[in-house]
Image (spheres, helix red, strand yellow):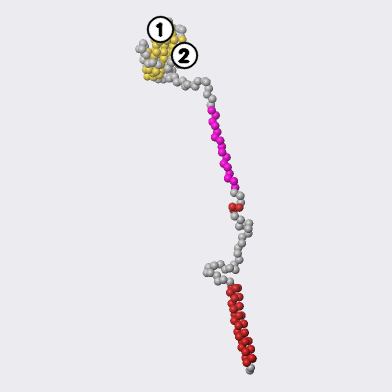
């Protein structure tokens, strides 16, 4: 073999080795490019599909207009009607008369020479008796309880009178005013069960 033929064969052999080396590197580059970067431990794979929510669902609640605050209705205080003052004087309560008290009683005038006072319901009836000088007055007890007709000044005293027909008589010979009372149920000065005899000429 000549020198030229040896040189041609050596060149072809070197060329074949370079082609194989280039093919190996190309394969490596393609593998690296296809696999991508090395994933870190615990990281999600890069080829996983992404969940993309529809635009309508991802809208924020703040995009909606804020509701206007409801105003509480305020109620004006009701004014109490003012009562007009009247010129009429205020009514005053009158004290209740005690049984047998002659203060509020109208006098009973007896023109004859005899008069009677009935003792009933713990009272003298009439409570105020007007008679003339010389008139005889009879006190008759009609209650179940015992009563007396006793002069405030000691002019007379009937003693205790029962219901069984016990009466007391007294004749007035001097003009004047003679208050009296029941000992167990009244007192001098018109206290409780009391009465008055007025003698005129």
Q: Position of residue 92 (x, y in %)?
A: 47, 21
Taking the spot 57% from the left edge, 41% from the top edge, the residue there is: 72
* Quarter occupied by residue 54: bottom right
In-image side of 44 versus 182 (left or right): right
Main SS class of the magenta portion in the image: loop
Residue at mark 1: 175
Pointer 2 or 1: first along the chain: 2
Relative to 97, residue 35 above or below: below
Q: What residue range appears in magenta?
A: 67-82
Looking at the image, which is closer to me, 166 or 76? 76
* Quarter occupied by residue 189: top left
Taking the spot 37% from the left edge, 16% from the top edge, the residue there is: 188
Relative to 45, residue 96 above or below: above
Exactly how many numbered labels are in the figure? 2
Task: Quadrant for the N terminus, please.
Answer: bottom right
Q: What's the distance in space between the residues labelled 2 and 1, CA to CA?
A: 19 Å
Q: Which mark is residue 154?
A: none
Question: In what element is the residue under mark 2?
Answer: loop
In-image side of 125 versus 7 (left or right): left
Q: Which mark is residue 106?
A: 2
Looking at the image, which is closer to me, 94 or 43? 43
Taking the spot 61% from the left edge, 66% from the top edge, the residue there is: 49
Looking at the image, which is closer to me, 31 or 153? 31
* Quarter occupied by residue 133: top left
Task: Quadrant for the C terminus, please.
Answer: top left
Q: Which residue lies most toward the front here? A: 3
Q: Position of residue 69 (x, y in %)?
A: 58, 45
């Amino acid at each position: 073999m000549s020198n030229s033929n040896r040189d041609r064969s050596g060149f072809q052999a070197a060329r074949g080795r370079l082609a194989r080396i280039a093919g190996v590197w190309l394969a490596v580059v393609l593998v690296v490019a296809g696999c991508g970067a090395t994933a870190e431990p615990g990281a999600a794979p890069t080829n996983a599909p992404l969940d993309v929510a529809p635009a309508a669902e991802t809208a924020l609640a703040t995009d909606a207009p804020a509701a206007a605050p409801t105003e509480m209705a305020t109620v004006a205080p009701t004014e109490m009607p003012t009562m007009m003052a009247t010129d009429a004087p205020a009514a005053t309560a009158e004290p209740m008369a005690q049984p047998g008290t002659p203060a509020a009683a109208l006098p009973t005038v007896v023109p004859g020479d005899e008069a009677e006072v009935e003792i009933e319901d713990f009272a003298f009836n009439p409570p105020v008796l007007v008679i003339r000088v010389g008139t005889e007055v009879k006190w008759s007890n009609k209650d179940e309880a015992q009563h007396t007709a006793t002069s405030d000044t000691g002019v007379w005293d009937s003693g205790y009178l029962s219901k069984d027909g016990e009466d007391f008589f007294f004749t007035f010979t001097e003009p004047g005013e003679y208050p009296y009372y029941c000992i167990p149920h009244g007192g001098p000065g018109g206290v409780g069960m009391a009465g008055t005899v007025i003698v005129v000429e």
